[in-house]
């Protein structure tokens, strides 16, 4: 199949070295700072969801133990 050059898949990277990759064309502080902030936010969110689930389950167990005949929903 004879495709125009713009449609050929190019699996090479835009950076010739690892240093160039980490430098991100001079925008390293912005790029890696954004990655770090995103990672922290997602980690915090996962932790908060886990804590909320634990607290909800604990409250349901406490309610069930106080009122054994009732559903704790």
Image: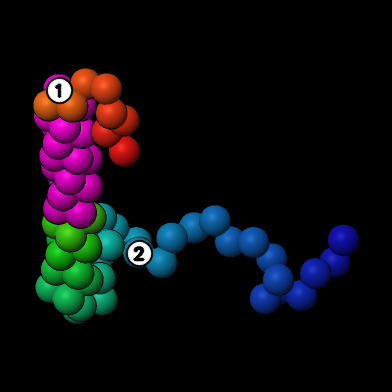
Q: Is residue 61 visible?
A: no
Picture residue at 31% right of the left edge, 38% below the top? 73
Label 2 element class: loop
Picture residue at 17% right of the left edge, 45% below the top? 52
Give residue 28's position: percent from left, percent from top.
17, 71
Q: Nearer the viewer, residue 37 or 16?
A: 37
Q: Main secondary structure of the magenta part?
A: helix
Q: Is residue 44 above or below residue 69?
A: below
- Quarter of the picture containing the N terminus is bottom right
- The mark that comes first in sequence, 2 or 1, is 2
Give residue 12's position: percent from left, percent from top.
49, 58
- Magenta stretch, residue numbers: 43-65
* Residue 39 relative to residue 70: left or right: left
| Res 23 quadrant in image | bottom left
* Residue 10 relative to residue 49: left or right: right
Residue bearing mark 1: 65
Q: Is residue 49 above or below residue 13?
A: above
Give residue 65's position: percent from left, percent from top.
14, 22
Does the stretch in magenta take in 9?
no
Residue bearing mark 2: 15
Q: Nearer the viewer, residue 7 or 64?
A: 64
């Amino acid at each position: 199949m004879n495709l125009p050059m713009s449609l050929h898949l190019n699996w090479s990277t835009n950076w010739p070295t690892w240093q160039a990759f980490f430098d991100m064309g001079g925008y390293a502080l912005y790029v890696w700072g954004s990655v770090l902030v995103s990672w922290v936010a997602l980690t915090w969110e996962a932790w908060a969801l886990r804590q909320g689930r634990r607290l909800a389950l604990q409250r349901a167990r406490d309610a069930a133990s106080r009122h054994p005949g009732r559903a704790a929903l």
